Amino acid sequence: MESKILSSIIKDRESFNKLSKLDVKDSFSEPAKFIYEIICDFYDKDTSISFVDLELIEKRIERELPKQIDLYRNILKTLDETTSSPNLLEEIIALKKDFISRELSSLLLTQKRTGVLELMEQYKNVEDSVDDDDEDESLLVGASVSNVVESLRNKNRIRMWPKALHEATGGAIRGNNVLVFGRPEVGKSLFIINMVGGLLHDGYKVLFIENEDPAKSTMSRLICRLAEKPIVDVIENPDEVENVVRQRGYDNLILKSLSPGTFRDIQSLIDQHGVDVVVINQLRNIWVGKEGRVEQMEIAATSARNLAKKNDILVIGVTQAGDSGTNKLRLEMGDIDFSNTGMPAQMDLIIGVGSNEEYDSKSWRMISLPKNKLSGEHLYFPVLIDTKTNKITSI
């Protein structure tokens, strides 16, 4: 079966898109998993291709695993068969449902029955996960003006936090790609934690990808922000705090630690949880399969944009400012570390978090908008930070 799956996804990107949602590689042998990862890498790097060249796969394997090339050549020879993608997909779905059914039956025989509801939901969603019957909104011909501008109305804009940022941008819309950057220890994480707290409060479902700080550390800071209490108070009254944060959107937060993770991992989580906003801390740490830092940054930014457009969500990435941003209040696009052009080109809004000794002493930060396609205003303004509650207040 694995040779049929590999044959299908090599020849047809649409088949790859559907089958990958079913986690088909989980049952693969190690050689098949290696080939599958190469196929994924090919499709990720070039979003325009509709198939993968077998010869290029062979050359890459020969370069990376020269001692095992004979084994892989024999496997690749079996991947040139013609396979009916729709019938293969139907068979994989049937096998997947059968597997879940057997797990469910075994679980129902136990006393605790922990996880029964989750398995029932998985069974129900197997076919929905590959359903492509959604209306195509990417092609607009003679569309009514009211439909085109509907997403731009104030009621449909996503409020940005703090208040001064929203006033400067008018808010974001689904499909926007946002970047927050600054020097180490300047408060980038605090800035996005404050923003996520606001988004959760407004009812949005947020996926927070953390590949820099420990997951529980970030989650505790998010709890402090939602509760508007320092961690010592949270520790003393966890039950009281839990009631408060759940009223303020805590249940709409999904935090996933990746080390470093790929954009395919993120897409899988989006498919699983159906979120409105994805936050990636840090964008530069996501694995994109390139060694050069400049190229990595551009690919990461482009992949983040693709996530936003494909899923009709808001994506917020975080990255570093270079040495030029040290003790600098108003950051510019040229201060982004390793990417003065490639990364900025893919962003709709760039938010710089700057500081110097004077601002540090006052617990202030300067927020600058070197790129702002949301409103066109390249403004800058000071804000007050509270490191104990991770709250940012407009001054």
Image: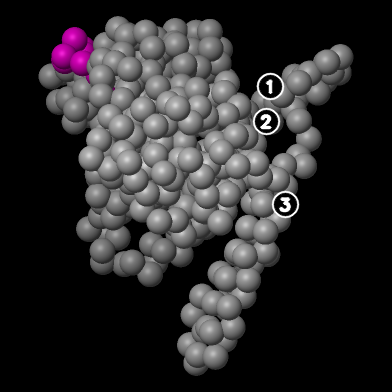
Q: Is residue 216 above or below residue 136?
A: below
Q: Is residue 309 visible?
A: no
In contact (CB < 8 Å): disc 1 and disc 2: yes
In percent of width and height, residue 261 lies at: 35, 42
Residue at the image point whose x is 54% and y is 77% from the top: 103
Quadrant where the N terminus sits is: bottom right
In percent of width and height, residue 85 lies at: 68, 45
Q: Is residue 268 above or below residue 28?
A: above
Q: Is residue 237 visible?
A: yes
Label at residue 156: 2
Badge 3 is on which residue?
A: 87
**Is residue 265 shown left or right of residue 134?**
left
Q: Name the residue type under label 2.
A: Asn
Residue at the image point whose x is 28% and y is 29% from the top: 63
Disc 1 packing (10 Å; few <14; some 14–19; many ≥20): some
Give the residues in magenta.
320-329
**Is residue 303 shown left or right of residue 237?**
right
Quadrant where the C terminus sits is: top left
Mark 3 and mark 1: span between their CA atoms? 42 Å
> Which one is earlier in the sequence, the residue at label 3 or at label 1?
3
Q: Is residue 100 above or below residue 85?
A: below
**Residue 323 magenta:** yes
> Which one is earlier in the sequence, the residue at label 3 or at label 2?
3
Mark 3 and mark 2: span between their CA atoms? 41 Å
Badge 1 is on which residue?
A: 152
